[in-house]
Image: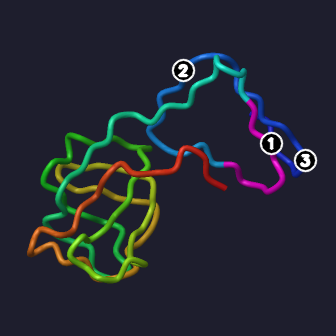
């Protein structure tokens, strides 16, 4: 795979591409182009699971109720619906899954309240990210 540089164009050929994570463009000033009407970037079906333990500030390990819904490499959001601080949503990539434990590329930025069922991990991610 070639490295992208500012000013480059990333051309995506025709086809439907089912995505489990973002297409990450690591540099600015890159044009992403597909074949009009023939290149489709489509997010895979969304999955979600409650976090039943873990998720204290700075943790990247979460015990979830439904680990079978996830796979390594998947883009996820870690959040707490009952937490009023909207800034505490973390987007990450699943790096490993062992049993009911999910390991992510990013750490939580706030304590998640998993006791009352507000904390969850879900496959929410942007199609393109920079």
Residue in front for this viewpoint, 38 or 88: 38
Q: Main secondary structure of the magenta part?
A: loop
Q: Quadrant of the C terminus?
A: bottom right
Q: CA distance from mark 2 to mark 1?
A: 19 Å
Q: Quadrant of the N terminus?
A: top right
Would you say 31 lies left or right of 46 here? right
Sequence-earlier tag: 3 or 1: 3
Q: Is residue 79 above or below residue 122?
A: below
Q: Which residue is mark 3?
A: 7
Helix, strand or loop at mark 2: strand
Q: Which residue is mark 2?
A: 16
Q: Are marks 2 and 1 in contact (CB under 8 Å)?
A: no
Sequence-earlier tag: 2 or 3: 3
Mark 2 surroundings within 10 Å by alpha-carbon count, few (fewer than 14), some (14 through 19), many (20 or more): few
Magenta residues span 25-33
Helix, strand or loop at mark 1: strand
Rendered residue at 90%/47% (across/down): 7
Residue 21 on image: x %, y %: 48, 43
Residue 32 lies in the magenta stretch: yes
Give the residue furthest to the right: 7
- Image mark for residue 31: 1
Mark 1 surroundings within 10 Å by alpha-carbon count, few (fewer than 14), some (14 through 19), many (20 or more): few
Rendered residue at 53%/25% (across/down): 17
């Amino acid at each position: 795979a070639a490295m992208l540089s500012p000013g480059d164009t990333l051309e995506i050929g025709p086809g439907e591409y089912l995505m489990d994570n973002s297409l990450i463009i690591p540099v600015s000033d890159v044009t992403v182009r597909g074949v009009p009407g023939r290149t489709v970037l489509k997010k895979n079906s969304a999955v979600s699971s409650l976090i039943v333990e873990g998720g204290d500030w700075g943790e990247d390990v979460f015990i979830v109720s439904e680990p079978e819904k996830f796979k390594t490499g998947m883009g996820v959001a870690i959040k707490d619906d009952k937490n009023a601080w909207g800034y505490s949503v973390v987007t990450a990539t699943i790096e490993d899954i062992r049993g009911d434990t999910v390991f992510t590329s990013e750490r939580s930025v706030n304590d998640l309240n998993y006791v009352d069922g507000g904390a969850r991990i879900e496959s929410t991610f942007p199609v393109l990210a920079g």
